[in-house]
């Protein structure tokens, strides 16, 4: 989630050169010309739907969005998410933010938004 989308790898290389010259830190880029993602036919039922279907973004960024979110379903609950993760080899999240990874890990519990990575990055 902390990646910068750019048009080409040439643009990324030029920015990286400047960051290095200025000793200004590190950034991960997603050059659109280097992304090769396949559209998948994902399950759509009462219990699950593709996360990508619920996101709003400019069509220019479709490849980047598919790269990051194209293999994730939104599931009604952890039980459903676990079933679909195993059956379709996809990651699943619930509306409560719990996550079932295709490799079998379950992630959940209380999340203090005041301490989230996104909030911390704003300060």
Image (cartoon, rainbow, N blue to C red):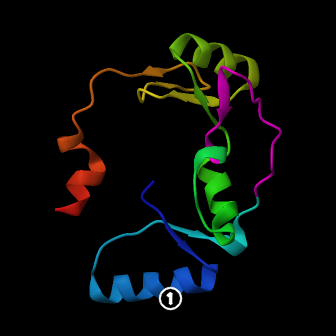
Tell me: residue 57, above or below residue 14: above
Residue in the picture at 61% in, 40% down? 51
User: In this view, which residue lies farthest toward the top?
Assistant: 79
Read off the magenta span.
Answer: 37-52
Q: Is residue 121 shown in magenta?
A: no
Q: Is residue 39 shown in magenta?
A: yes
For the residue pair 15 and 93, the one nearer the viewer reads as: 93
Residue 8 x %, y %:
64, 80
**117 with respect to 100 (left or right):** left
For the residue pair 25 and 55, the one nearer the viewer reads as: 55
Residue in the picture at 42% in, 30% down? 97
**60 with respect to 3 (left or right):** right
Residue 108 falls in image quadrant: top left
User: In this view, which residue lies farthest toward the front?
Assistant: 46
Tell me: residue 47, above or below residue 52: above
Residue 25 x %, y %:
30, 73
Residue in the picture at 68% in, 62% down? 62
Tell me: residue 78, above or below residue 29: above
**77 with respect to 122 (left or right):** right
For the residue pair 31 and 92, the one nearer the viewer reads as: 92
Q: Indicate the secondary structure of the residue bearing disc 1.
A: helix
Residue 117 x %, y %:
28, 48
Residue 44 falls in image quadrant: top right
Count how many numbered circles sit on residues in the image: 1
Q: Residue under circle 1?
A: 14
Quarter holding the C terminus?
bottom left
Residue 103 falls in image quadrant: top right
């Amino acid at each position: 989630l902390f990646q910068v989308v750019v048009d080409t790898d040439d643009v990324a290389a030029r920015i990286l050169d400047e960051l290095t010259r200025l000793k200004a830190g590190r950034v991960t880029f997603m050059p659109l010309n280097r992304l090769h993602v396949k559209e998948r036919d994902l399950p759509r039922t009462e219990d699950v739907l593709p996360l990508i279907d619920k996101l709003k973004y400019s069509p220019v960024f479709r490849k980047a969005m598919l790269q990051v979110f194209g293999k994730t379903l939104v599931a009604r609950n952890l039980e459903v998410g676990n079933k679909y993760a195993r059956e379709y080899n996809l990651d699943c999240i619930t509306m409560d933010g719990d996550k079932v990874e295709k490799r079998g890990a379950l992630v959940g519990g209380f999340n203090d938004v005041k301490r989230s990575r996104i909030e911390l990055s704003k300060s």
